[in-house]
Image: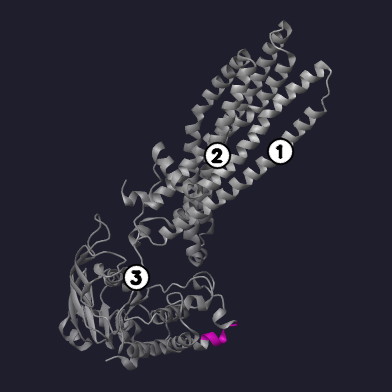
Amino acid sequence: MTTDERAGAPAARLSTSETWRALYRHFRPHRWAVALGAAFTLVGAASALAQPLAAKALVDRLGGGGSITGILVLLTALVVLGTAVESVGAYILARTAESVVLTARRTLIGRLLRLRLPEMERAQPGDLMSRVTSDTTLLRSVTTQSVVSAGTGGLSLLATIALMGVMDPVLLGVTLGVIVLVVGATALVMPRIAQATKRSQEAVGEMSTVLERAFGAFRTVKASGAEDRETAVVEDAARRAWRHGLRSAKWEAVAWSSVGLAVQVSFLAVLGIGGARVASGAIPVSTLVAFLLFLFYLIEPISELMEAATQYQVGSAAIARIQEAERLETETLTAPSGTGSGPAAVVFEDVTFHYRDDLPPVHQGVSFTVPGAGTTAFVGPSGAGKTTVFGLIERFYEATGGRVLVDGKDVRDWPLADLRASIGYVEQDAPVLAGTLRENLVFGAPDADDEQITQVLVRARLDALVERLPDGLETVVGHRGSKLSGGERQRVAIARALLRRPRLLLLDEATSQLDAVNEMALRDMVAEVSREVTVLVVAHRLSTVTLADRIVVMDAGKVRAVGSHHELMAADPLYGELAATQFLASAPRASSDAP
């Protein structure tokens, strides 16, 4: 299976050996706690097995006319001890199960947040969220209850059968004959449970994906009157999860009812045949009483084994989905060791790039040089590959051919943390995260102090906004910054980038939502910053372009020309056309800067 298929398609079912290896990997850090819980469970099971023997002694004592006080005290002690010990064991296992889930979630979240950008773009975020939440929850039962139940249930079953065989091999043969017949038939439904559970989990992942899409574009959904349509899509996924859940429940009900049927039929058979053996004098009545009690106690280990098998079938589907997420390619990040000082130089040497092999190339031999400091603007029609330049510098993507150099060093040779620590990046849609304004500002520079924050607020023209907000920097900005205007979100993103004190500042349409006053102020700020920082900007506004030290004109994945505004107006027809049409759309708002 390819990475593309893993990210977007349902998880493939793992083989039994792969499932057990993955299961042990989750189980291993907690093996001693599980062993302790299992030990308590076994002690509880042993005390339960001793109770039929005490009951037999009680019946024999009644038949002989002896005192039964001691036996009653022993029987009571066994009941209380067994209950108490099993309760402690159950708590230890439940606590360990929660720890298994926590560890799995931490590991998976750590991996998902380090995914390479192409992997995330191919994946469905909602489905990945489902694997972190819903699928890891299923580990709770399969890694502890299933494993422990299989072990303790199996030992209890063997011990019970051994004691029943000692009491009367004939009745034991009757019991095993019925149980093996019914339980053997039940085993046939286990694969159906696993299949139904896997499909149900996949449907839950689809539901999460649709909800994530709708919540991420909530205003668009409302403005388009699409609430009912989006609701129908979510409900369709929910119905599929419901249908597969019912199918799983149906087969689980068949499995559990078969266990009850096996015990009841065994009871009737033992009662009939055992009664005949008591009447014939083959066994005393106390043996029949004890055997019947053992038969009832046999329900628990059989149930545990059935529960273990059921949970394994359910959990194996979840483990397969978690394994698929863990196989996605991640980046290797270490703590920054040093980013150098001064403006960074950027060079593209005959760079080629395409997002996937089946897609046309985005860059076809792109070459340009940006010396340290100053502002370089990238212009060109939509789809020319301007934003991709920033993605290659940040190493969100790897160039297919050629080299991308920062300070004369191939970006692939930079420690990734050092490379990104030297860059401030403002994305095209200027995302703002849910939380407070302060949390957004220091997102890329968590150690920034109040003085640095204040300086950046002034430079990004956010100081007046902070003064108006009810809680200042501690004001909650809402989901994706919904309580801020588009221009305010852009300024927050710019301030966040500047607070990192970058050597290289990447601005992707950073002024598209600013009014004329704030745009002019931001231009002045960029001009000031560019004296000590290398600024690369993707721009469509004429005012931004004309102030650049150099302009790179791109078209169809190639660099057409490099020069100043006046040079390009005279030498490059495409640039002249852009200046006369696309750029001039914003010229009236900054006419004083137009040539």
Q: As rendered, which of 387 and 110 lies closer to the eye?
A: 110
User: Main structural element of the magenta stretch: helix, strand or loop?
Assistant: helix
Q: Quadrant of the C terminus?
A: bottom left
Residue 174: give x, y in percent of width and height.
Answer: 60, 15
Read off the residue under disc 1.
81
User: Which span is picked out in magenta?
Assistant: 465-470
Amino acid type shown at disc 3:
Ala
Q: Which mark is residue 417?
A: 3
* Marks 3 and 2 close (CB-CB < 8 Å): no
Going 35% across and 59% down the picture, which residue do you hit? Answer: 330
Is the residue 63 above or below the residue 223 in the image?
Answer: above
**Amino acid type indicated by mark 2:** Val
**Labels 1 & 3 near each other (Cβ < 8 A):** no
Q: How is the image coloured?
A: one colour
N-terminal label among 2 and 1: 1
Q: Is residue 164 visible?
A: yes
Give the spatial CA distance, label 2 vs label 1.
Answer: 20 Å
Above or below, 345 against 100 in this view is below
The numbered mark, 3 or 2, whose residue comes first in the sequence reads: 2
**Residue 84, image x, y percentages:** 70, 41
The verdict on residue 468 being magenta is: yes
Q: Dot 2, crowdedness within 10 Å: few (<14), some or many (≥20)?
A: many
Nearer mark to the viewer, of 3 and 2: 2
- In this rendered view, identify the residue nearer to me: 318 or 448: 448
Quarter of the picture containing the N terminus is top left
Quadrant in which residue 532 is drawn: bottom left
In the figure, 236 relative to 494: above or below? above
